[in-house]
Amino acid sequence: MSSEVRLAFAHPSERAIATAGDDPRDRISLRDHIREVEIGAFQQERGTTQRICFNIVVEVAPQDGPVDDDVDRILSYDRVTEAIAHELAAERLNLLETLAERIATRILREPQAIRVFVRIEKLDRGPGALGVEIVRSRHNMAGLAGQADDDAPHPRVVFLPNAAVNASNLSAWIDTLEAAPEPVVLCVGRPDAAAPQAGSAMPQRRIDLLAIEQNAWVLASRDPRCVVVTTRTELDWAMKHRRISVWAPSKIVLDSVEGPGAALRDPLALADWFARILAARELLVIGQEAPTAGSVPHRALPLDRPGL
């Protein structure tokens, strides 16, 4: 069998290696991901589902520094499976070619992605697998760079002062927030106890952030629905899956190019900064006055009356 024919039927990862240029690239892959969907142009394919198998390889630029076991420095596998799930949920399609094109486009919106191989096969239409495979790269998809993800969530960021964290009706508030249509990200202040004082700004910055994180864990211990998150990848996943997150700020603040500046000294101002970073729908402050000016729409609600 010639090499061309062999590669035509090989896994996309082999094709990616065989067609690689001089620039070194890393690859992540999704193999034999099977979904039951309704798809197809023929009448007998309407009103019924069939098994569709996805094999996807994404080429990414090598890291310019150590990964340091940091999930935010890599392209998450969740982004690949979410691209599939989003396009399957968007509308019923007739053609695998359309589905493959849309999945490739969505994956290439990720800043790390350079080139993507998408193979989709129908498993139930005959004695073998019937499918398509496409290859798309960032440089030949005009206007893709910088394109916003139209599926990005716009959460409600909620600031809970210590009185709210320790309130007897905290669970009632969590019930209310959980029932709202928007994903929820909770922010807290520092504990009432004074934090240690360092002799210089950088150590004090870390101490203040760790103090907020201690309070985040206190909140999480009071209601199991509140899950502490430290990375943007964790947070994005939680928002898309409608999980309530409690923000532990150290990593995101310290990794940010344009940090919160003076807002770091004020936990409520820090929450407002974070709400802007997330393009939040609003900043809701419970049991305390809202900031007089903020980056996003904001309002305050009394602690003793759970309700939005």
Image: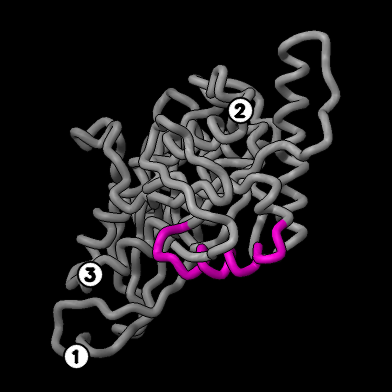
The kind of residue on which mark 3 rests is Glu
Is residue 211 visible to the viewer in this orientation of the structure?
yes
Q: Position of 210 compared to 40: left or right?
A: right
Residue lying at 41% horizontally and 70% vertically, measured from the top left: 53
| Residue 257 located left or right of residue 191 | left
- Tell me the distance, in whole angstroms, between the alpha carbons under discs 1 and 2: 62 Å
For disc 3, the marked residue is 91
Q: Looking at the picture, how far across and down is residue 60, in whole percent?
A: 46, 35
Amino acid identity at mark 1? Gln
| First reached walking from the N terminus: tag 2 or tag 3 | 3
Q: Closer to us: mark 1 or mark 3?
A: 3
In this picture, which residue range is highlighted in magenta?
167-183
The CA distance from mark 2 to mark 3 is 45 Å
The front one of 175 and 126 is 175
Per the image, is 177 magenta?
yes
Residue type indicated by callout 2: Asp
> Which circle, 1 or 2, is nearer the viewer?
2
- What residue did someone put label 1 on? 44
**Front residue of 122 and 160:** 160
Q: Which residue is mark 2?
A: 266
Q: Name the spot of residue 201 as percent of width and height, x first.
A: 72, 11
For residue 264, the mark is none
Q: Quadrant of the C terminus?
A: bottom left
Residue 129: x %, y % from top left: 35, 75
68 drawn magenta: no
Which quadrant would residue 102 be assigned to in this image?
A: bottom left
